Amino acid sequence: KAGVTQTPRYLIKTRGQQVTLSCSPISGHRSVSWYQQTPGQGLQFLFEYFSETQRNKGNFPGRFSGRQFSNSRSEMNVSTLELGDSALYLCASSFGDGGGETQYFGPGTRLLVL
Amino acid sequence: GDSVTQMEGPVTLSEEAFLTINCTYTATGYPSLFWYVQYPGEGLQLLLKATKADDKGSNKGFEATYRKETTSFHLEKGSVQVSDSAVYFCALTVYSSASKIIFGSGTRLSIRP
């Protein structure tokens, strides 16, 4: 069974640009969550999509947005990039049943903003 | 709010030493508790989990017991190996927003041969 895949793996952008990251969940999983990992703030929840709808949202500005397609693949977009957006962006997938279920993480996309 | 506090690192041990990484939590309701591991250059892998009080999660020689009375979920391993060198994250989810994982700050573990 293929794991969670994320593309691209590495990305370099400049301030003010926008970026789109992609996540393909494990087959059969309907929930995709996104996390930002930085040395200073650690791992922080961005948002979760389930059946093409945003179900949960973290405390990030509106520059961070996402969507999910009918095949459960998800994209995350960051507009007007800032230096502080440099981070490892991880996505995780699960069936979405809640209650302590296991979430499976992808390898991440490392974004560097210059 | 819900939160996880774990032992500051880095932790450096010799091979075959006993490992404990402390983790305590604050949560409304009854959280599920997790330990994740991140090897260099990789994403997160679930190491073990426990979904109710007194449950013991175990995997690859690692163990942690869900202690409701002390709100703790300490990670232990009796004999560590060089291959255990990684960053370990304690985490929780609460039922009302079960997809949102709240992570601790992580503990970097280095094992000397």
Image (cartoon, coloured by chain):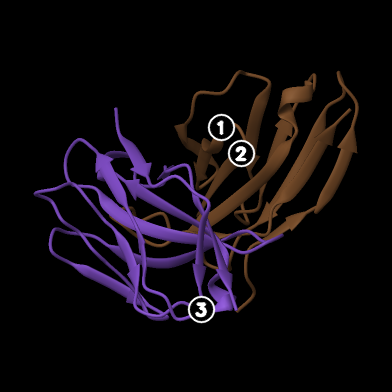
Chain colours: A brown, B purple
- Quadrant in which the C terminus of chain B is drawn: bottom right
Q: Disc 2 marks which amino acid?
A: Gln
Per the image, the residue denoted by label 2 is A36
Q: Disc 3 marks which amino acid?
A: Glu
C-alpha gap between disc 2 and disc 1 = 9 Å
- Whether residue B62 is visible: yes
Left or right of residue A21, residue A39 in this image = left
C-alpha gap between disc 3 and disc 1 = 31 Å
Residue that appears at 61% across and 41% down: A37
Task: Give SS at disc 1.
Answer: loop
Whether marks 3 and 1 lie on the same chain? no
Residue that appears at 86% across and 43% down: A11
Foreground: B63 or A7?
A: B63
Left or right of residue B36, residue A67 in this image = right
Per the image, the residue denoted by label 1 is A41
Q: Are marks 2 and 1 in contact (CB under 8 Å)?
A: yes
Per the image, the residue denoted by label 3 is B15
